[in-house]
Image: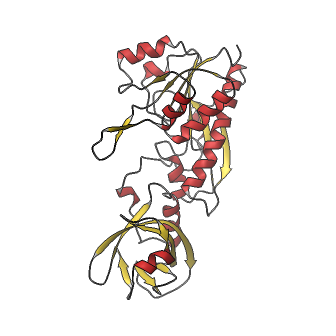
């Protein structure tokens, strides 16, 4: 069988999944259907429906699109079965029931943005940066019952620079993911794969999970070393963004999102969490082993800006405490 005859159903939702679908389409692979999330209600009255990034691309390419609310719905299962897929590919989608992932003769494989078995879960890129890792990667693996535990087909590794935020790493992995998906399909077609059970890839290093990130997850804990807070902030930048609460001398509270910082390791006598500024050019937080200089910030309700621009409109006459 060649790639033009191989019937592929593709499943994905966000921008990260578009690149892999684009590589398949532009590579001449036979995409017989695309499964994505239902359109999301948007706007003040929730009366505007926003299609997913994958749906937008699929519609532009004239591909058949399925948008089930329930992946176990009998009508959806029959519609999916009618596509007669030989292979299914999943990139940044939902947990599939066995009746779906076990349908094609060649199986269903997933592209995951980590070096499995590490960082199983919904937010692997964020957690790799938050934890200060110097390396990450992408993995293709066959789906099975437990999420992110199937046999590994292929992996690609990349370094994480100390200055990379999660947006930079996301874009690198997205580009590599498109190439790895097509390479994995090619190797499946010619029988050049030797899937490896993840149990055989385990090391003495404890497994680190990658759970979904919520607003409370993003609140900064200032009672940590400079490097820990620095990594936490870049691991959430530009989205969803780390945040803190700042109080002025009158006791008024402000919610502040922080996108970019710089480390200043030194000894000092300032109390932990003290916010120090000259009111014009710098704003930094005292931590146990130095200061964290704030570079790009945003008051909720305002636009994102440099600290210099922020200080021009937000007068700081005394030191402020950060919660």
Residue 155 shows in the view? yes
Q: Position of residue 81 (x, y in %)?
A: 47, 13
The C terminus, quarter of image = bottom left
The residue shown at (56%, 82%) is 266
Q: Position of residue 97 (x, y in %)?
A: 42, 24
How was the colour assigned to the protein in this rendering?
secondary structure
Is residue 160 rendered to the left or right of residue 215? right
Residue 100 drawn above or below residue 254: above
Q: Position of residue 270 (x, y in %)?
A: 44, 86
The residue shown at (56%, 58%) is 165
The residue shown at (36%, 15%) is 74
Count of numbered marks = 0
The residue shown at (27%, 77%) is 252
Is residue 196 rendered to the left or right of residue 306? right
Residue 153 shows in the view? no
Relative depth, front residue between 192 and 44 = 44
Dividing the picture into quarters, in which one does residue 321 lie? Answer: bottom left
The N terminus, quarter of image = top right
Relative depth, front residue between 91 and 83 = 83
Dividing the picture into quarters, in which one does residue 246 lie? Answer: bottom left
Q: Position of residue 78 (x, y in %)?
A: 42, 12
């Amino acid at each position: 069988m060649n790639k033009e005859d191989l019937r592929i159903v593709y499943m994905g939702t966000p921008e990260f999944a578009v690149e892999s679908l684009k590589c398949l389409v532009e590579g001449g692979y036979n995409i017989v259907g695309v499964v994505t999330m239902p359109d999301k209600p948007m706007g003040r009255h929730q009366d505007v429906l926003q299609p997913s990034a994958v749906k937008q691309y699929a519609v532009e390419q004239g591909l058949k699109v399925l948008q089930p609310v329930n992946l176990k719905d009998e009508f959806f299962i029959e519609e999916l079965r009618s596509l007669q897929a030989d292979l299914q590919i999943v990139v940044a989608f939902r947990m599939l029931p066995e009746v779906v992932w076990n349908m094609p003769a060649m199986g269903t494989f997933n592209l995951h943005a980590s070096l499995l078995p590490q960082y199983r879960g919904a937010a692997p890129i964020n957690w790799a940066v938050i934890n200060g890792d110097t390396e990450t990667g992408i993995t293709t693996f066959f789906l099975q019952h437990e999420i992110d535990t199937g046999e590994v087909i292929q992996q690609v590794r990349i370094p994480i620079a100390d200055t990379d935020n999660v947006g930079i790493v996301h874009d690198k992995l997205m580009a590599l993911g498109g190439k790895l998906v097509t390479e994995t399909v090619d190797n499946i077609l010619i029988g050049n794969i030797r899937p490896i059970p993840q149990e055989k890839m385990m090391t003495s290093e404890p497994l680190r999970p990658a759970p979904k990130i919520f607003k409370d997850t993003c609140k900064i804990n200032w009672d940590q070393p400079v490097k820990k807070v620095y990594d936490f902030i870049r691991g959430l930048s530009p989205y969803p963004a780390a945040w803190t609460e700042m109080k002025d001398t009158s006791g008024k509270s402000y919610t502040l999102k922080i996108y970019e910082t710089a480390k200043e390791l030194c000894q000092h006598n300032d109390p932990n969490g003290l916010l120090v500024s000259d009111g014009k050019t710098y704003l930094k937080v005292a931590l146990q082993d130095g200061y964290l200089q704030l570079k790009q910030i945003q008051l909720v309700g305002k636009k994102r800006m440099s600290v210099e621009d922020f200080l021009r409109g937000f007068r700081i006459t005394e030191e402020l405490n950060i919660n």
